[in-house]
Amino acid sequence: MTYQLKYKPFGEQSVLIEWPQIISKEILKDVLSFKAKLEAEKRIHDVNHAYNSLLVSFNDFTNGLESKINELEAIYNTAHIVNKYAFKRWRIPVCYDTHFGIDLHELALTNNLSVDEVIRRHSTISYTVYFIGFLPGFLYLGGLDKTLYTPRKASPRLKIEKGAVAIGGGQTGIYPSESPGGWNIIGNSPINFFDIKAQTPCFANAGDEIQFYQVSKEIHSNIKTLVEAGVYQIESEVIND
Amino acid sequence: MIKVLNAGLYTTIQDFGRFGVQNYGIPYSGVMDKQSASFSNAILGNSLDLPVMEITMLGPKLQFETKTRICISGANISPKLNNKIISNNKSILVEAGDVLSFGKLKKGFRAYLSVQGGFKTENVLKSYSMYQNITLKSSVEKGDVLKIASFKDSVMLANASIKVADTYLETNKLEVAKGPEFDQLSEDQKKYLLSNTFSISKDNNRMAYQLNEVLENTLKPIITSLVKPGTVQLTPSGKLIVLMRDCQTTGGYPRVLQLSESSINILSQKYTGQIITFKTNIL
């Protein structure tokens, strides 16, 4: 399926491409397919995406916006590039113990659920990775159960621990590094979501899925030790669809 | 080698930044004022994008352990070599043991120190720009010993200097284009934005400059989308935030204006309380 896209200038060398303002896996697929085509183009300096937008920066903008838009439209309408990357589903351990999940009780109470039910609903869904933003390695995940939607805290905390698993509004995510933040903390994952020393700093790619599973404090600590030693292998499987 | 005797207020090593890694949520970074950094490199015959030291308001105290040529551009922070005042925008030979220090801020806000051949500090993802959790150091600290390129004497550069028109350090007109959500603003909002003067709040740093004035705002947040240095965001409370080089790669506030590249440089030389206006031909 192709969409009616909007092309807008965004800064001196860039064009912003917008899809309809809806968060959906179908749109993500189309965004990623267009992005893959653009990445094959030498004329393009840089391309980045979010839920329903692409930011394309050109090496040379001398022919002006109109000509760039024509070029981009032509590329959009070329045949789909077979995506060589096989999307993966990553199994991510999370300890929901209240030692980590400092807002878990309150969040359960707000949503009229038991703590166990919050954990069950949070860890049964496979979340889609839409893009990485906010902080290096912060995954924007789609698919949170509506019964877990919880407003951000009125005043953000100055310090949230690395690995904190949190819910903010209709989104869930993992803090890849210590940072200030206003989301409700429900657990912690020992996995490194951003490793500057690794060949690719983030193991997860847009289009992949994240599946959380519950572990005890003890197993959390064991996995953390392995992660820090650089020997932990995250479980994953190829998604066939 | 350069030994850091005193770090100053906020001193970092920067080049033109990291590209092609924003997909990981990594900021662009890079020198705040590209024009000044380019001057300081050009005067030494360096490539314009070689890593330089970005100095903010209060300068560091540095001791050179090897001979080299240096140049300072951008803000005038009364630089001194061995306690004798030196000029900006001039190639200056320094000997091992010489001490560079700074005094009173006279003009601008950020100065750039280049050395011949550039700084040779940690390079991560093809950039020397310091950034927390990307490079080991997020700023230059007292006691650091910074590697620089080894010195090759060049007669040509002996008296190199460029007459730099530094009026850009004092202009307060920022040239802007429409941001992606500009057209959603009401006529009154557009008029206010483009005719009012704005003052820089105390929340100004390498990530963003927040402005003090409040614009009546009825725009809803957008689905998180892409932002870049120079993007002017309108928050739900009506405050304007101008994103700078270390900004996040995505954001959820309406993007009402986009600064030109040269306006990002101009704003980088401003500090708390100073006044700016947005200049445009879009209306």
Image (spheres, coloured by chain):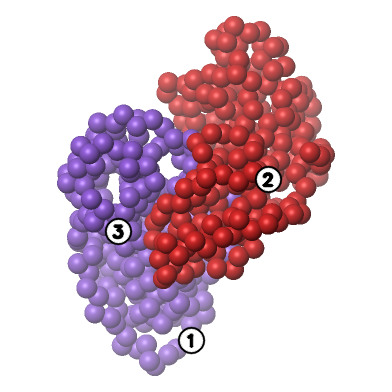
Indicate which label's residue lies in the foreground, 1 or 3: 3
Residue named by callout 3 = B263
User: Which residue position holds label 2?
Assistant: A205
Q: Which chain is red?
A: A
Looking at the rendering, which quadrant does residue A235 occupy? top right
- The disc labelled 1 sits on which kind of residue? Lys
The residue closer to the viewer here, A175 or A15, is: A15
Using a 10 Å C-alpha cutoff, classify the residue at mark 2 as few (fewer than 14 neighbours), some (14 to 19) or many (20 or more). some
Nearer the observer, B91 or B236? B236
Q: Quadrant of residue A101?
A: top right
Residue B156 placement (x, y as % from top left): 38, 92
Position of residue B38 relative to residue B159, above or below, is: above
Chain letter of mark 1 equals: B
Q: Badge 1 is on which residue?
A: B152
Residue shown at the point (57%, 28%) measured from the top left = A171
Q: Residues within 10 Å of mark 3 (few under 14, many from 20)?
A: many
Three-letter amino acid code of the residue under disc 3 = Ser
The purple-coloured chain is labelled B
Q: Do callouts 1 and 3 mark residues in contact (Cβ within 8 Å)? A: no
Q: Please, is residue A99 above or below residue A222 in the view?
A: above
Q: Secondary structure at mark 2?
A: loop
Tell me where residue B120 appears, x and y as whole percent. Answer: 53, 69
Tell me the distance, in whole angstroms, between the alpha carbons under discs 1 and 3: 35 Å
For mark 1, give the secondary structure: loop
Q: Would residue A216 be found to the left or right of residue A4 on screen?
A: right
Residue A180 position in % (x across, y down) = 49, 33
Q: Residue furthest bottom?
A: B155
Q: Is residue A223 left or right of residue A181?
A: right
A236 or B165, which is in the foreground?
A236
